[in-house]
Image (cartoon, rainbow, N blue to C red):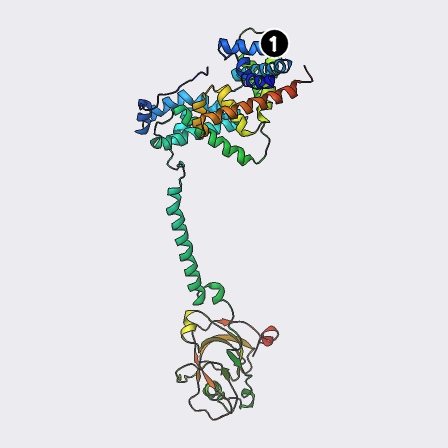
Amino acid sequence: MWINSECSKISALLWDYAAQRLSESETTRVERHIAHCSRCTEQADAYRLTVGMLSAGRRQAVPTSLSTWQELRGRLETPERRPIRRSADLLPRLTLAGAGTALAAMLLVTFYSQGLHPSVANHPRPPETVRAVPLTTHDEMPAPETKAEASDVASRTIFQGFLPGEAALMEASSVPAPLTTPVSHPLPPTRLRLARWTPRHGAASARNEAKETYTAQLDGAGDPPRTQSHNFVISPVATQTDAETTPHYVMGSIPVGGGTSAGNGDGAEEGRAW
Amino acid sequence: MIATTGVTMPGAEDPLVARCRAGDQDAFAQVYAQYERQVFRYAYHLLGNREDADDIKQDTFLRAYSAIKSFRGESSLQTWLLKICGNLCRDRIKSWDKRKVVYDSTLRDEQLGMSGEAEDPLAIVQRNEMTDTIFRVLRGMPAAQRIIIVLHEIEDLNYEEIAEILGCSRTSVKLRLFRARRALKERVTSLMKPRI
């Protein structure tokens, strides 16, 4: 028991004994103990070996550093050196980041709710808003003989021939506000029917639900079929004669730009026609 | 018992530090010249290769330069620099994510090159072998034990200085050092046993 206690005390001194850092009295005490304790002698030898190896490495093991003061000085003068980060510095940054995120989220919500985002604006309008009815009255009309007559026919075809009772034009789920006075159509076709419509969404469409862009397929007498785009105004009919049809609309033409596109009016165009 | 090197007396403002605080780069160049070797050596022993040790050394002085105004002089400049260096080394070791630390292959060549005096080639070879062995053993030890061995046995820092660097008490340093020494001895013994 006494030996174990003494061994533990001596064991704590063996490293410094091997490194020759002990005082004379301590050195004598250790030597006296290890003279009759084989276990501590073995320990002392192991410590001596370790310390000797460590001191050998301590003297020679480190290579030369390649970085110099000039390099460091260049980095010191660089303006974007990193300061030591502290929690006090992080707080305003986090606050700013949070405020920025909240603002961006609010802007996104506003953007989407008003339909201003391109992905919303380019989305086609739901088909149930406006439904088209095929126009059939053109074929029953007599063919015009003169240009003035053709123009008159075209005018009537558009604004009178589509009145309720002859053919239903449009039905809408919502009724736009004012009645638009019909204006004469500038095109001279003897036969006109709507081929397809291209809805325009966005701020202008939101303000005036009735204004849409349509592409009319024009089939003139003796002319090859062609298509032409116009803007039309759909407005409610002031004098409804058919009480069973509600509500009815007529189209006024407002040529805006009038972009003409080639097409023969059949095939794919027919498939997409109203 | 333990040698102390480069320790300034606490309480008295080091004029070099005061000049560094004022932004004097020449004064900081003196600090660099005085401590760069020790910082590099410490980083090298902790990281095990010259490139990383060089990086850490420069980063240590960069951080010291930017934070010198917050240096209160309660510890010596040497322990403050080694503390920064140790923290950077710890971060670097963590970033390695269990990657094995590999010592330079140039180590042996440099050792041979450094011994310009007429020395017994057999002695050089034996010493190189011992050096390789001890550092291989050191690298296999846990970082906490390796740090305390390097600080005390290689950098010759006393208990108080190590306590400042590690942020613990003197008693804790003594206990940790005792355990680290014992672990090192056992590893060396187990490694050298077949040869003995």
Residue in the foreground of this view, choosing between B148 and B15: B148
Residue A16 visible at all: yes
Residue found at x 47% / y 63%: A118
Residue sitting farthest toward the right: B194
Residue B161, percent from left and from top: 43, 24
Residue B50 visible at all: no
Residue A100, percent from left and from top: 40, 53
Residue type marked 1: Ala
Residue A162, placed above or below residue A85: below
Q: As drawn, is B116 to the left or to the right of B29?
A: right
In the picture, residue B163 is in which quadrant? top left
Which chain hosts label 1? A
Residue B83, placed above or below residue A152: above
Residue A161, percent from left and from top: 49, 88
Residue found at x 53% / y 33%: B93
- Quadrant where the N terminus of chain A sits is top right
Q: 10 Å neighbourhood of mark 1: few (<14), some, or many (≥20)?
A: few
Give SS at disc 1: loop
Judging by the rendered image, the residue that carries numbered circle 1 is: A35
Residue A139, percent from left and from top: 56, 88
